[in-house]
Image: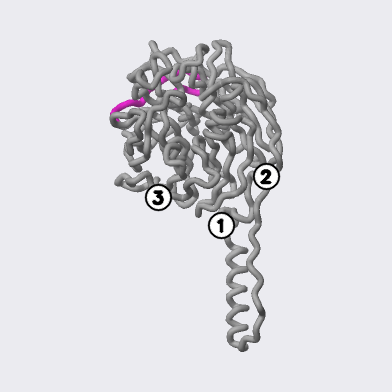
Amino acid sequence: MSDSPRPVVTPPAPARHVRRAPARHVRRRTVPLLLAALAALAAVLAAVTLAPAGALAFDHPFIGAFTTVSSIGSTVPSNKDVNPYGIVKVPRTLGSLVSGDVLISNFNNFENLQGTGTTLVQMTPTGSLSVFAQINPSSLPGPCPGGVGLTTALTILPNGFVVVGSLPTSNGNSSTARPGCLIVLNPSGHVVKTISGPLIHGPWDMTAVGNDENTTLFVTNVLNGPVGETPIDEGTVVRIRVHTDEARPPAFSSPQVIASGFPERTDPNALVVGPTGVGLGDDGTLYVADTQGNRIGAVPNALFRHTPFGGGGTTVAKGGFLNGPLGLTLAPNGDILTVNAADGNMVETTPVGAEFQPVDTGAGAGGLFGLTVAPNNRSVYFVNDANNTLALLH
């Protein structure tokens, strides 16, 4: 991703096209048919009344009313790491973490070499920046093949421990990319553990769901198999169970592949292209941003399935307003929010594949990666790689 300066602009108000049903000639019908029609109408009205927000998402887009992009502040810390990738809201104050702040991972170092960023920064809603952690590759407490290059895979567990992905390079080129690992830090920003092995192979993005004691991680991996510039269908999603409590570090189960067959490839500009953002719906379906396939995939029964779902999951949407989807999160109404690598747009897609008019974030091509709904559920935070800032769509 490029980090050349680009202005943050205010996009035009997104418009939604409303299709109207064609006019029909009214003819006389018998009383039974009229009664049947009235009964059907009553059933529809009852269903609408009882339907959850997600079922009505096509009529009520979450980002449809947002018209302004505001820059919150620079994500560049004192060591000059750039290219912000991962983003997660801080749910409560623990250690150095402050509730309401945003935690951000940097993928590039001060020389703008991809896969060499080592810092996690914390930003307040008013733009004050602090360094949560600067990870030293030479002093990790466990294996992390290749070192440290922090990716979009970033989450905070209920007990305040932070998990971040590493897909490292030695010189910013895909030819030196290595499998990396997941790095676990305590709430004060100190590394306590690494998670690596044959199923953690280029952890690229991640989401977490659960409660105070039991959490499940879903991690996308983009370096499986002999990855080169020709796409291969080897990208995976792995599931990791986590047990957490306040008294001790979290305990992680062995990773298990629950989805496979996502296309992945190396890229001289983006380093690697493959399955990226993930989000779990209320019905247990895991949605995956398939960047190379220009689609949103779906993996049913993601929490409990015992065998991998092949073929990159079922297709929710492909093409249309999608243009290299990267980061992914779920809106409060159940819709899927993604950001495009190729044009800087944010796209809202319903779980059945309907799309709304996209919002231009002003970041341009190569400027977007991670995003998350703000705590007030009335705006969206996103990182702008083009000018190394945290921004807010509202």
Q: Outermost residue toward the bottom? A: 30
| Residue 267 placement, left or right of 325 | left
Depth check: give the residue in front, 18 or 110.
18
Q: Residues within 10 Å of mark 3 (few under 14, many from 20)?
A: some
Residue type at mark 2 is: Pro
Q: CA distance from mark 2 to mark 3?
A: 29 Å
**In magenta stretch: residue 247:** no
Residue 63 point in image, percent of width and height: 64, 44
Tell me, yes or no, if residue 142 can be seen here. Answer: no
Label annotation for residue 293: none
For the point 41% across and 28% down, which residue is it? Answer: 272
For the point 65% across and 63% down, which residue is it? Answer: 20
Rendered position, 230 above or below 141: below
Q: Does label 3 or label 1 sit earlier along the sequence?
A: 1
**Foreground label between 2 and 1:** 2
Q: CA distance from mark 3 to mark 1?
A: 19 Å
Q: Residues within 10 Å of mark 2 (few under 14, many from 20)?
A: some
Residue 143 point in image, percent of width and height: 33, 19
Rendered image quadrant of residue 215: top left
Q: Does label 2 or label 3 sit earlier along the sequence?
A: 2
Q: CA distance from mark 2 to mark 1?
A: 21 Å
Tell me, yes or no, if residue 117 can be seen here. Answer: yes
For the point 46% across and 45% down, which residue is it? Answer: 296
The residue singled out by tag 3 in the image is: 314
The residue singled out by tag 2 in the image is: 14
The residue singled out by tag 1 in the image is: 55
Residue type at mark 1 is: Ala
- Tell me where the magenta segment starts and ends, as one range: 185-198
Residue type at mark 3 is: Thr
